[in-house]
Amino acid sequence: MSTSTALIVAGAFLASAVEMVEAVTIVIGVGVVRGWRSPLIGAGAATLALAVLVAALGPALTVIPIHVLRLVVGALLLAFGLQWLRKAVLRAGGWMAQRDEGVAFLREQEQAAAAGTEERAGLDWYAFTVAFKGVLLEGL
């Protein structure tokens, strides 16, 4: 394996690891507030859905010409990057409030605790849905 290939693999692995940590954080947060069974089932269902999606759509990427794929991915990266840069500049300049993760966590924790506790089919559907959506979106 060449050095450039190894660096690409390492970069992709580290980016995936960051997304995995974010997904696990969501599952832990919901599990602590609402119980563990439903969030773990939701995370497992989302992982299964991602595996099916990759198996179904992965081979389709070989049909798309590489220059078109690079253009689309580059445009998306540029669009998201410019939005993040804009927010960072506004926060650094004092035009936008700094993000307080502690306050955000407490707000989400209160919302999760206040959500309905109705169980159907033995699942807390609020906890299942939050974990499923978090893992699915972080996995994409």
Image: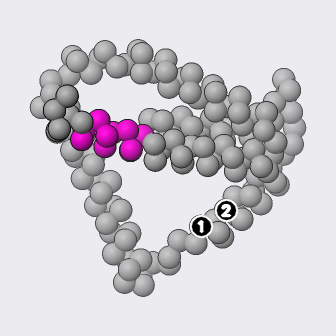
Pointer 1 local density, CA inside 10 Å: few below 14, some 14–19, many at least 20: few
Label 2 Cα neighbours within 10 Å, binned few <14 / some 14-19 / many ≥20: few
Residue 68 x %, y %? 16, 31
What is the spatial separation of the Cα atoms under label 1 and label 2, in whole angstroms?
6 Å
Residue 12 falls within the magenta-colored stretch: yes
Mark 2 lies on a secondary structure that is: helix
Q: Determine whether the residue tagged by mark 1 lies in a helix, strand or loop.
A: helix
Checking the image for residue 105, the label placed there is 2
Q: Which residues are magenta?
A: 7-16
Quarter holding residue 38:
top right
Instruction: Give amino acid for label 1.
Output: Glu
Q: Is residue 20 left or right of residue 117?
A: left
Above-or-below relation of 2 to 56 = below
Asked whether the beta carbons under mark 1 and mark 2 sit within 8 Å of each other, the answer is yes
Q: Quadrant of the C terminus?
A: top left
Q: Label 2 amino acid? A: Phe
Q: Residue at x 24, y 53 (%)?
A: 78
Instruction: Check the image and name the residue furthest to the bottom.
Output: 94
Q: Kindly identify the residue that appears in the image at 79 percent across and 33 percent down.
A: 37
| Residue located 23% across and 18% down the image | 62
List the residue tagged with mark 1: 101
Q: Looking at this view, is 20 or 81 the one in front?
A: 20
Residue 125 in view (yes/no): no
Residue at 22% of width from left, 46% of height from top?
A: 75
